[in-house]
Amino acid sequence: VVPSNRHVVIRDGSVGLEADHGERPRPSVDLLLSTAARSYGDRLIAVILTGSGTDGAEGAVEVKEAGGCVVIQNPRTAAHPSMPAALPPTAVDHVADLEQIAPLLDDILRGAGIEKRIETVDRGAIDQVLAMVTRQANIDFRQYKPKTILRRISRRMALNHLHSLEEYRDHLEAHPQEVGALVQSLLIKVTDFFRDTEAFAYLEAEIMPKLIEQGRERGRVLRFWSAGCATGEEAYSLAILVASTLNRELPEWSVRIFATDVDDEAVNYARRGAYPPSVLRPLPAEHKARFFEPSDLGLRVTKSLRQMIIFGQQDLTRGAPFPRIDLISCRNLLIYFKPELQQSMLDLFAYSLHQTRGYLFLGKAETARPTKSTYELINKKWKIYRCMSGPLQVPIRAPNGIRAADPALVDGEQAGEAVRGRREASLGDEVEVRRVNELFLRSLPVGICVIDRSYKILSMNPAARRLLGVREAATDHDFLHTARGLPYREVRSAIDRTFRERTVTVLPNLEMGSTLGEARVLTIQIVPFEGIGAEAALVCIENATELVQNQRRLDAVQSEHSQLADELGAANQSLTEINKDLQDANEELQAANEE
């Protein structure tokens, strides 16, 4: 119980009170959680129950950032659900009804003991669990640091009352839904608006003017990539930075910010662009007034800013990179990867940046060291680099996300030959695909797009570009992000099924989004393509809009006809009853006349 004019804080493991100076609500839940997070780090468990307002949302994010665990009462059963509902989904580990929280805490605490016990377990058992996750969830965690992996797995084991990795492996096989729960616990997804204010100030003063100068020479075009965007604060920070710098010139520019994350739930939250006021506290008042508007749960990013950003789900270890990027922001994500995967990601970023000699913006806690032959160090404190060179083709990675030249896979001279052979084969295949496109595909009325296993577009004919609303060649782009109006998860699952089972997958009557400015319905077929020697697929796109509209009109006419028939039948029935009444009345009249 805290006095109304005091804040409760945790300092060096002790509970204390401090005076309120009018800077926060009284007493501040945010302050309590943030000071506890600094004191206890990843040992802290924060439990948030029902409450009004959004006080506590910012503190819960700090708990999560420190590696702690956040448990909230189920908003559906909470008396005042606004507080639990105000938390970003990426900051929450567990949602439970009130009576379930005490047993849940017991399970979480037992997880700490399990972690210590399984640290000595053979690495092969952990690899088996992670291989199962990779196979079912299509996300590769085998290159994450072992300590992070062990902590998350042990918590899941405790929650399921399991005592060995072998038991947990069997549990994953029997309960596929547990794979999703484990994936959510493994993902790193904490961010803030303008995280490290001084770093963004340096970007605004030193880097942004150079990017704008280069962009003018390319027809006023700027392209950014927020890799590992979590709930979107970083991507929106970049958008605010660009809008503030360009100011009135902004409508004259084509600005695209690609924001990707492996967590689909976090991406959906980011796409909405609505945040509680406590999360927006670091923003200057003029930014809030200019770039945000009131919403049910606080403030929402204005439409003009949201339209600059393309959000999409992507696993960095598997997805294709975006080409011709001016700046990549990937902050405090690589620290969770092993050195081999860090280098693979840096090579991937170099492919995106080398054409524009763009900039790489890493987090200040990053341990990755970009090679001097590829990157030039611009600012050591804020880990900002400029890409000086890069691969002409997308860096080749094995199916598990490791580069093909990794010594763990091949060694010595064989590694170099393997990489060169694959690169030459890949280049030859793509040249052949484009030659086929020139000779055959461009004349077809049906949209045809050739993609490889990583969803990269090898070729796209004019009909496909027209149907998908793509205004550029889009070669080497990620198909799933280029076809913005299509339902992402449904199309990705269909493509994965075609590659996995080598069968034709049909997606009938897909409703396009509003990005094209008109209603459009497409039928898509994904067909295995064996003709070029590489693993590829044909995406065949047909315009079914007129057919669907005619069918809807026919259904409407039939429905109207059926309704009229029902009304006519009812009218006939009513007339029959009236005639019967009339006949009865006549009989009564005749009887009366006879009497």
Image (cartoon, rainbow, N blue to C red):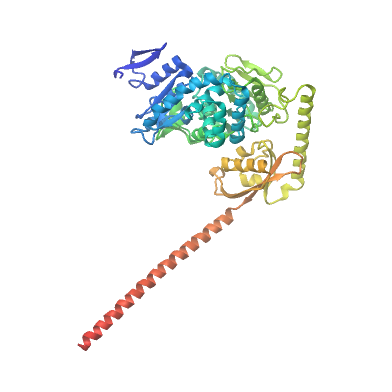
Image point 64% across, 39% down: which residue? 479
Residue 590 percent coordinates (x, y): 25, 86
Closest to the observer, 505 or 142: 142
Residue 387 percent coordinates (x, y): 67, 22
Quarter holding the C terminus? bottom left
| The furthest residue to the bottom | 594
Q: Is residue 321 above or below residue 119?
A: below
In the shown orientation, is residue 591 left or right of residue 363?
left
Closest to the observer, 119 or 523: 119
Is any part of residue 201 visible from this angle? no
Q: Is residue 322 above or below residue 151?
A: below
Is any part of residue 48 visible from this angle? yes
Residue 444 percent coordinates (x, y): 71, 51
Image point 42% across, 66% down: which residue? 566
Residue 244 percent coordinates (x, y): 51, 26
In the shown orientation, is residue 314 left or right of residue 423?
left
| The furthest residue to the left | 595
